[in-house]
Amino acid sequence: MNPVFIIESIRTPRARANAKGGLFKLNPYELLDVLYKDIANKNFLNLNELDEVILGCVTQHGEQAGNIAKSSSLFSGYPDSISGLTVNRFCSSSLDAINLGYLKIQSQQAENIIAGGVEMMSRVPMLSDGAVIWTNLAIASQAKIFLMGSGADLIASLYKISRNDVDAQALKSQQRAVAAQENDFFKSIIPVINQSKAINCFKDECVREETSMESLLALEPSFKKLGEEGVDEAQLNYFPELKEISHIHTAGNSPAIADAASLTLLSSKNIQGNDLRARAKIISVVTVNDNPLLVLSGCVLATKKILSQNNLQVKDVDLFEIHEAFASTMIHCQQELDIDDEKLNVNGGCIALGHPMGATGSIMMSTLIDELERRDLNLGIVATSGAAGAGTAILIERV
């Protein structure tokens, strides 16, 4: 089997997903074009040697429909011979894109693949595809699939996580993200500059430096109304040991929706370009599915499995980048895995930095590699959660 190297992992800044956000004026093709051009200009390989582009995208609707992996590579002038695949595994999509790229190269189906993701949530809003699973409670109840915030409140209820706990987690995420930005730790960000559209986006926009416990505690629960409309009753039918659902997640301790794109170049060879060399090697990948009712617990199960699969313990891994899909998810993760706080999401998570759904996993990969390099460490794990209990994890080592 072929080895699989991460030659480069880059991303755009994460912009606020509204009309005032720094990337709103760009369509997904124009945003991805910034990253495609950066990969091409670094001369890692002749683009005719690139086999495939695999992109994650959750809301494949409107500007993001039409197999955006293939159509965007054509838009950016990449060779016609490159195939394209767009995947949707909810919020694990772009990490699964890397996973698929790894498996194709490892099995000698390909030698060079770009994997990543895109999500322009300001222009293609979450749920705008009209999927019935999110709009019909009877179908959702039978399928055991509920919206992510409802799952986060269920996790909090099952594992006795308090409002103070989740707000403290959110504050920590913000404080770490502020420190990381101030110290310029996110080296893989490619600035997005478009003079004709007056765009100059250099850093993640969702970070809220002014956040305090007092400001967080003042926010109202975001998912209580959904619970009152029938979701609570449906969840309690599956968990009779609970008397009620604790609605403790707010806009402040939930992931910030965002616009962004990310690309990771994978190769069977430790190729070099412009005096650069491979940044890491993929050691192992896993894909799992936990109880769909818990919605966002897949990252915990995936992390456990990849550790077991490689005969590793938590203490053997230098850094973990785990999807901060709501504050209760991270607290549950630490309860289950007992990861040292100084190894986990050391530069903040999605609550502070933003969560562009289909791009998040690949962004987390670039963040992990940046930090391993900065600290001169070796082993790291990226793990994501997605709706319906989806979970993906990748173990990497620097080369």
Image (spheres, rainbow, N blue to C red):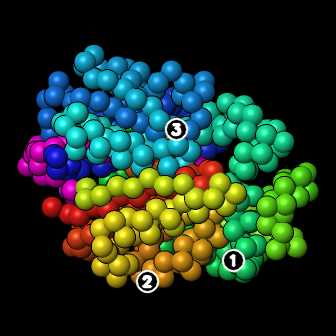
The stretch in magenta equals 255-281
Q: Amino acid at mark 3?
A: Asn
Which label sits in the foreground, 2 or 1? 1
Check if residue 278 falls in the magenta segment: yes
Q: Which residue is mark 2?
A: 340
- Locate the C terminus and report the quarter of the image it occupies: bottom left
Mark 3 residue crowding within 10 angstroms, few (<14) / some (14–19) / many (20+): many
Q: Earlier in the sequence, mark 3 or mark 1?
A: 3
For the residues labelled 3 and 1, the Cα–Cα distance comes to 29 Å
Cβ–Cβ below 8 Å for labels 3 and 1? no
Disc 3, SS: loop
Q: Which residue is mark 1?
A: 159
For the residues labelled 2 and 3, the Cα–Cα distance comes to 32 Å
User: Residue 115 at x, y = what percent?
Assistant: 34, 40
User: Residue 120 at x, y = what percent?
Assistant: 55, 37
Disc 2, SS: loop
